Amino acid sequence: MPGWPYSFVAALEKHGGEFRFATPETWGTADAATVQVTDRYGTARTMAWDRIHPRLTTRSTWIDHTTELPVIEGTQIRLQVDRLPGGNDPLPLWLWSSATGLTGDDTDIRWQAFLRRFDLEHTFRIAKQTLGWTRPKLRTPEAADRWTWLIITAHTQRRLLRETAADLRHPWERPAEPGRLTPARVRQGCRNLRPHRQTVREHQRTLTGRGIKHNLSKDGSQPGSRSHLPRGCRCHTSPSAITMAGTDHST
């Protein structure tokens, strides 16, 4: 045909027959097939076809490509499950891997890793929206690294409290299974843990059976009494620094 860089016959020799997802007659014989029984999705059946490549066009990533477009071969994977957790109709899922020569075990690793992608996306969303990962305006890479490790620590703490926190859910949220609370739901239930938490002094009193010497706390108040200092001064400001901050140095 006029304007084509090569004839239709040459294109057929280069790309082979067309592989259509909605037409099983074009699939041919699968190079690998597996069957896995899962608790969440029922029976998962996979089929894999080796050396299937997409037909590239001069758009998006290849828009500035001037020479002949390459052929990038890979493995086409079809995943079919019995059920979905939400009760929706389980449509087949098509995946493509850039690796070739995959075995049945390699195929299972690919679709299982794809399902774990949703866990990673939710983890990033919780870190940003709930834990405030991107909220502070940090100026140095070192400060950003320290803040990231603090967020990871806070997320790990939420995971460890799954068995202890209560499921304080909103009316529109579904009840969670015991021990399966998300970090955001654990954060909502942490407020009930404080009245039942034993302080270090109470623990020492339980072990020794002796009274505790009532010394002043760091903020100058009696132990057990509520501090009247501003909220920002309780964590990192000593009484001497508060005194110096409140002293008038103009005279």
Image (cartoon, helix red, strand yellow):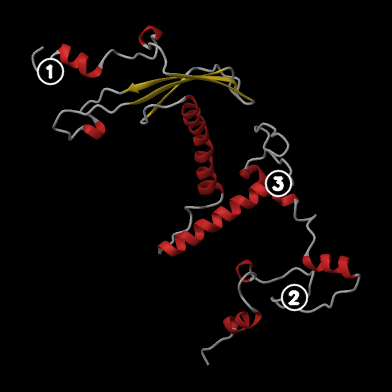
Q: Which residue is mark 2?
A: 221
Residue placed furthest toward the left: 2
On screen, residue 82 versus residue 207, left or right, reads left
On the rendered structure, is 162 left or right of 98?
right
Relative to 65, say whether 44 is above or below: above
Q: Nearer the viewer, mark 2 or mark 3?
A: 3
Looking at numbered disc 3 in the image, what kind of residue is underneath it?
Answer: Gly
**Measured from the top left, where is residue 230 in percent x and y?**
64, 69
x then y, percent, for residue 76: 39, 22
Label located before the other in sequence (3 or 1): 1
Q: Are marks 1 and 2 in contact (CB under 8 Å)?
A: no
Is residue 189 visible from the viewing direction of this image?
A: yes
User: Is 170 drawn above or below residue 245 in the view shown?
Assistant: above
**Tag 1: residue type?**
Tyr
**In x, y percent, where is residue 140?**
40, 64
In the rendered structure, the answer to whether residue 160 lies left or right of residue 126 reads right
Identify which residue, 91 or 173, lies in the foreground: 91
In the image, is 11 to the left or to the right of 142? left
Of badges 1 and 2, nearer the viewer stands: 1
Marker disc for residue 189: 3
Q: CA distance from mark 3 to mark 1?
A: 66 Å
Q: Which residue is mark 1?
A: 6
What element does badge 1 sit on? loop
Classify mark 3: residues with Cα within 10 Å, few (<14), some (14-19) or many (20+): some
In the displayed image of the protein, which residue is found farthest to the bottom? 251
- The mark closer to the camera, 3 or 1, is 1
Q: What is the tally of numbered marks visible in this picture?
A: 3
Cα separation, mark 2 vs mark 3, equals 29 Å
